[in-house]
Amino acid sequence: MNRLSIFLPALALALALALPGTATTHEPVAGRTAAPKEKDRFQIVYYWYTYPADTYNDHESLVVEELEWWIILLVPVDTNPTGGTLIARGYLTNAYPHTSYASEYLYAHY
């Protein structure tokens, strides 16, 4: 093989490895908006029941319910059980007594 036939692929490989994020990005055309992502188009709404009393609270999405509990308790509220205290459970159906397990659990981190 010639020196040139080895040098050019080696140079191309070195550039491809060294400059992966330097490609130009194209902005969307004015007046056009990008299509929403699949997960951003739909929000699942749950029937929320308090724990341990198991009383109906409201019918909201996970994000709204986290915000409501955060405002009420003034502590971080999320779905991470590590170090948290269970405060509410979210069900997909409003059947009572509950016919299925809760789909979401909210924990307060005191």
Image (cartoon, helix red, strand yellow):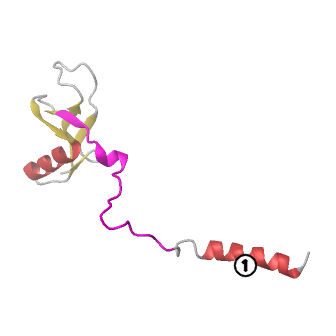
Residue 37 belongs to magenta span? yes
Asked if residue 82 can be seen in this view, the reply is no
**Where's the N terminus, which quadrant?**
bottom right
User: Residue at position x 35%, y 57% from top?
Assistant: 34
**25 to the left or right of 58:** right
Would residue 93 be visible to someone looking at this image? yes
Q: Position of residue 38 (x, y in %)?
A: 36, 45
Residue 90 image offset from top left, x and y in percent = 22, 34
Q: Camera-side residue: 17 or 89?
A: 17
Q: Position of residue 109 (x, y in %)?
A: 21, 50
Q: How many labels sit on residues?
A: 1
Q: Residue at 17%, 24% (x, y): give it.
A: 94
Q: Quadrant of residue 87?
A: top left
Q: Residues within 10 Å of mark 1 (few under 14, many from 20)?
A: few
Is 43 drawn above or below residue 56 in the view shown? below
Q: Residue furthest right?
A: 1
Q: Does residue 16 belong to the magenta stretch?
A: no
Report the predominant secondary structure element of the magenta stretch.
loop
Question: What's the residue type where badge 1 is placed?
Answer: Leu
Instruction: Kindly identify which residue carries mark 1.
Output: 11
Q: Is residue 19 left or right of residue 54?
A: right
Seen from the viewer's position, the closer of residues 98 and 35 is: 35
**Residue at 24% in and 46% down:** 84
Q: Residue 29: percent from the left, percent from the top?
A: 37, 66
Q: Is residue 82 left or right of residue 17?
A: left
**Secondary element at tag 1:** helix
Please determine whether, in this image, residue 57 is positioned above or below residue 101. below
Examine the image and state in which quarter residue 12 appears.
bottom right
At 84% across and 81% down in the image, what residue appears?
A: 4
Q: What stretch of residues is rendered in magenta?
A: 24-47
